[in-house]
Image (cartoon, grey):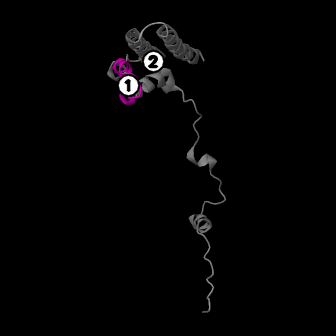
Amino acid sequence: MVRSLRALLLFWTIFASYGLTYARSLVVGKARRERLFEAAHKKNARRLAHGFSSLRGVFIKMGQVLGVTGTFLPPAFPEALEELQDKVPPRPFEESKGACAKPSVPIRSPASGVSTANRSPRRRSRKCIAPRRATVARSP
């Protein structure tokens, strides 16, 4: 729950940054507007890369995918997200050890969900075969 709120805060911070940049760009000239958006792209790309890195898990994977296939993003984003490719800090073993020790889903034996009524292969195969249709001879 806390991680979801942190992700939401990260995205809204980036949206607000672009909103403020847009509002500022309405007052200045075209050359200054382009510089404002370039600076906003760089700052928000670094913010997103750092945020994904601190959020860990699926967010790091999403950053890696955006870094490789994010051609629809401004050029600053793939450059900043490159650090998520191989510079991700490793997780301490103590954090991972708990997840490996106790399964999150109860383990059942493979035969526990199988009923004993249809164990014969012959019976099962007959149910799977569609009946043949009777062909009707047509007269010319």
Looking at the figure, which quarter contains the N terminus? top right
Horizontal side of residue 126 vs 41, given as left or right: right
Question: 10 Å neighbourhood of mark 1: few (<14), some, or many (≥20)?
Answer: many
N-terminal of the two: label 1 or label 2?
2
* Residue 18 counted in the magenta span: no
* Residue 69 counted in the magenta span: yes
Q: Kindly indicate the quadrant of the structure image that contains residue 129.
A: bottom right
Question: 10 Å neighbourhood of mark 2: few (<14), some, or many (≥20)?
Answer: many
Q: Is residue 30 above or below residue 57?
A: above
Report helix, strand or loop for mark 2. Answer: helix
Locate residue 62, reporting x and y percent.
45, 26
Residue in view at x 38 percent, y 29 percent: 71
Locate residue 95, reporting x and y percent.
47, 17
Given residues 1 and 6, the one toward you in this image is 6
Given residues 134 and 138, the one toward you in this image is 138
- The residue lying furthest to the bottom in this view is 140
**Marks 1 and 2, Cα distance to the nearest angstrom?**
12 Å
- The residue lying furthest to the front in this view is 29
Looking at the rendered structure, which numbered label has been put on residue 67? 1
- Residue type highlighted by circle 2: Phe
- Residue type highlighted by circle 1: Gly
Residue in view at x 38 percent, y 25 percent: 67
Residue marked by disc 2: 52
Give the residues drawn in magenta, as a range. 67-82
Locate residue 30, reporting x and y percent.
40, 12
